[in-house]
Image: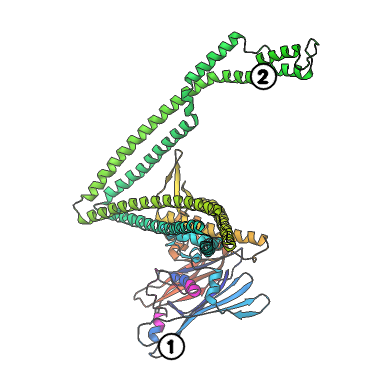
């Protein structure tokens, strides 16, 4: 999907009909538009989502006032006015013209609700065209609404991607974008098919098979319910965690509580480090005991082995005077070394065979030599084991003391906040502690559900095996059982395929995320995309991976890096599909339209992000204010800009409000006094 243009008609701040050309190429993929605060940058961003999906972001206020206020006020009662968004784009070899529009009749000064009409025209490369009978479904097939969050977003709010409550939704949307949803949908539908098949088995399979199938059905229902319960608990945990973070944030802002909360934050961070160090030492000890613990019990064994070897040497048994392999060869050859024939079972043959029992095996002798060689090193290994264990025990003891000390200090600080004479502080701390307790209970519930799911899976597997062994004489029931077994096998295979593909996609996303983040940040922080699609930051401290509290700016960089990784991986996957013979040249190509790309970033980060932006997607529309976009930002972006423009603000505000913006050595109107409040899109190049 590549944008060609967008046309706004009386859409909020944009009075009349205004068009922006968005065509671009691989060398200059960026359209850069400057606008003052309130000029309509966010409105322009939402014009895309309203045109495509009929909705706007939650941060847009007064969403019922779609028509430009000044145009609506000037409209006589009883007259009508059009509001519309037209988007032209091409996708996989076809040109599209989308129009979402409505005609509003003015009955009062208040704008009432309305139902816009969506139309979509498609033109193929051969010139033929058609009108879509299902325009919204067509748009959703090109770019599903959930996936659009990665391509149309406000930079100041993009950090919502890294909030705990968003992980499940992000994972779902990623699956859609990366072609994993079809496999997941099949897995969901197969149990329904299986239930229809097993109904025949229960009807005609006999009492035993029917009872087993009833048990399987009951267990399957319990499993489905447990999975649903787990999703609810995980969502509740994310919500509670966010609420706890907000409460702690309020404590940090409170004048009386701030110093105590700041110290508690520091103590909490130190406590995390201490616990991680303690756990690392405990894990090292467990590994040491598991891999070398046996050495502690080899003292007596080594001495006994050495004494046995010395005894054998003293008796002349070691080294053996005669090797058994030598005697076997004489018997096989049928002749002694003195030339005497060795006929089987003859007196001479029996005499030589007696020597075979007294001869030694070369392998045994070699083994004895090896064992003897290991006795001395074994003593050194025991000594090293004792020293390593002693060192680890000291570390564990030290870290346990540190943990206990920090826990005691944190408890004191908790008490100070809880017993604070100011009611506001007490209430906040009481709420925080309540949230901590609820989170603990939810985690217990989560653990119990996960244990139940493991048990249910084993029981279902066992019952399925019993069903396969159950005697079934009815042909219809036997076929139903065979088909059910096949469906179960297919479901299992698809689950394995999905797990493999999910992990492959996650690892590829994670690698790209790390590369993009590293190119932007100057911190030694490492981002990670977890198995649950949770975006986290950590750092390595003395070999221990520790989580890093994310600032607003780091959240923004982390989210931008993730969006860039998603965009690149989507293109790579579609490219792989093309290599397999399916998919158009631009399959997997989507534009990125972003408002306030540099909202919470300092100048160094703004410059680094600017360099990264031009590589984020094949097409990029950046909406910035003068304070965000001038200087280093525009210097970095201009070589990649195909279209440069200004959203000129017209305001009725009193006083000297006029302002200009200087771009490429020329001055352009930025804010102007006017008889009405509205904005105009002005193209510079």
Q: Are marks 2 and 1 in contact (CB under 8 Å)?
A: no
List the residue tagged with mark 2.
362
Q: Residue at x 45, y 50 (%)?
A: 454
Residue found farthest to the bottom: 78
Q: Is residue 491 visible?
A: yes
Mark 2–mark 1 distance (CA, rounded to whole Å):
107 Å
Q: Position of residue 218 (x, y in %)?
A: 44, 58
Residue 434 at what x, y percent from top left?
Answer: 28, 53
Closer-to-camera residue (76/674): 76
The quarter holding residue 125 reads bottom right
Q: Is residue 347 above or below residue 283?
A: above
Which quadrant of the view contains residue 40? bottom left
Most common SS among magenta residues: loop
Q: Position of residue 262 (x, y in %)?
A: 30, 48
Which quarter of the picture shows residue 577? Answer: bottom right
Residue lying at 71% horizontally and 19% vertically, measured from the top left: 325
SS class, disc 1: strand
Q: Nearer the viewer, mark 2 or mark 1?
A: 2
Q: Is 49 within the magenta? A: yes
Q: Earlier in the sequence, mark 2 or mark 1?
A: 1
- Is residue 56 found inside the magenta-colored segment of the image? yes
Q: Which residues make up the magenta segment?
A: 47-71
The residue tagged 1 is: 80
619 horizontally vs 596: left or right: right
Other residues around mark 2 within 10 Å, as few (<14) / some (14–19) / many (≥20) = some
């Amino acid at each position: 999907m590549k944008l060609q243009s967008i046309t706004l008609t009386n859409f909020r701040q944009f009075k009349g009909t205004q068009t922006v050309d968005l065509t671009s190429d691989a060398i200059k993929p960026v359209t850069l538009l400057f606008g003052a605060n309130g000029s309509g940058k966010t409105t322009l961003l939402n014009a895309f989502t309203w045109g495509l999906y009929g909705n706007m972001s939650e941060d847009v206020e007064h969403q019922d006032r779609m028509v430009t206020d000044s145009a609506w006020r000037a409209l006589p009662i009883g007259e009508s006015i059009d509001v519309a968004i037209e988007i032209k784009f091409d996708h996989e070899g076809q040109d599209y013209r989308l129009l979402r529009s409505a005609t509003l009749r003015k009955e009062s000064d208040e704008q009432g609700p309305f139902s816009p009409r969506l139309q979509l025209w498609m033109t193929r490369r051969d010139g033929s065209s058609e009108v879509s009978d299902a325009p919204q479904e067509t748009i959703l097939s090109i770019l599903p609404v959930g996936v659009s969050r990665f391509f149309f977003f406000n930079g100041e709010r993009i950090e919502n991607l890294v909030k705990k409550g968003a992980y499940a939704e992000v994972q779902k949307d990623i699956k859609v974008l990366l072609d994993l949803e079809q496999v997941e949908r099949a897995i969901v539908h197969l149990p329904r098919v299986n239930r229809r098949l097993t109904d025949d088995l229960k009807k005609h399979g006999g009492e035993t098979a029917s009872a087993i199938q009833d048990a399987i059905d009951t267990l399957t229902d319990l499993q489905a319910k447990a999975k649903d319960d787990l999703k609810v608990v995980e969502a509740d945990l994310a919500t509670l965690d966010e609420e706890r973070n907000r409460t702690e944030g309020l404590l940090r802002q409170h004048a009386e509580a701030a110093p105590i909360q700041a110290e508690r934050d520091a103590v909490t961070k130190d406590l995390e480090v201490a616990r991680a160090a303690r756990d690392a030492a405990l894990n090292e000890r467990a590994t040491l005991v598991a891999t070398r613990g046996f050495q502690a019990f080899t003292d007596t064994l080594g001495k006994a082995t050495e004494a046995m070897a010395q005894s054998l040497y003293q008796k002349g048994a070691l080294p053996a005077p005669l090797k058994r392999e030598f005697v076997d060869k004489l018997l096989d050859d049928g002749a002694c070394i003195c030339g005497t024939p060795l006929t089987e079972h003859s007196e001479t043959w029996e005499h030589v065979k007696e020597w075979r029992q007294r001869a030694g095996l070369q392998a045994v002798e070699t083994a004895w030599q090896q064992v003897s060689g290991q006795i001395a090193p074994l003593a050194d290994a025991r000594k090293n084991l004792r020293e390593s264990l002693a060192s680890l025990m000291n570390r564990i003891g030290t870290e346990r003391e540190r943990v206990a000390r920090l826990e005691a200090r944190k408890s004191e600080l908790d008490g100070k906040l809880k017993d604070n004479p100011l009611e506001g502080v007490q209430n906040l701390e009481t709420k925080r502690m309540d949230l901590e307790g609820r989170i603990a209970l939810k985690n217990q519930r989560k653990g119990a559900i996960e244990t139940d799911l493991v048990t249910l899976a084993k029981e279902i597997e066992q019952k399925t095996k019993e069903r396969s062994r159950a005697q079934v004489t009815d042909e219809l029931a036997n076929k139903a059982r065979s088909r059910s077994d096949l469906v179960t096998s297919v479901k299992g295979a698809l689950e394995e395929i999905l797990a493999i593909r999910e992990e492959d996609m996650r690892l590829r996303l994670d690698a790209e995320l790390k590369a993009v983040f590293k190119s932007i940040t100057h911190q030694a922080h490492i981002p990670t995309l977890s198995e649950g699609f949770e975006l986290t930051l950590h750092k390595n401290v003395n070999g221990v991976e520790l989580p890093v509290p994310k600032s607003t700016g780091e959240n923004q960089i982390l989210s931008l890096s993730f969006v860039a990784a998603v965009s690149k991986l989507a293109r790579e996957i579609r490219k792989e599909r093309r290599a397999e013979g399916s998919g158009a040249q631009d399959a997997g190509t989507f534009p990125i339209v972003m408002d306030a790309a540099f909202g919470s970033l300092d100048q160094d980060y703004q410059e680094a992000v600017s360099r990264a932006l031009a590589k984020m997607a094949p097409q990029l529309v950046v909406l910035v204010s003068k304070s965000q976009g001038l200087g280093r930002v525009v210097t970095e972006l201009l070589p990649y800009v195909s279209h440069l423009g200004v959203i000129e603000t017209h305001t009725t505000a009193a006083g000297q409000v006029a302002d200009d913006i200087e771009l490429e050595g020329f001055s352009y109107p930025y804010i102007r006094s006017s008889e009405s409040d509205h904005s105009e899109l002005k193209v510079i190049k």
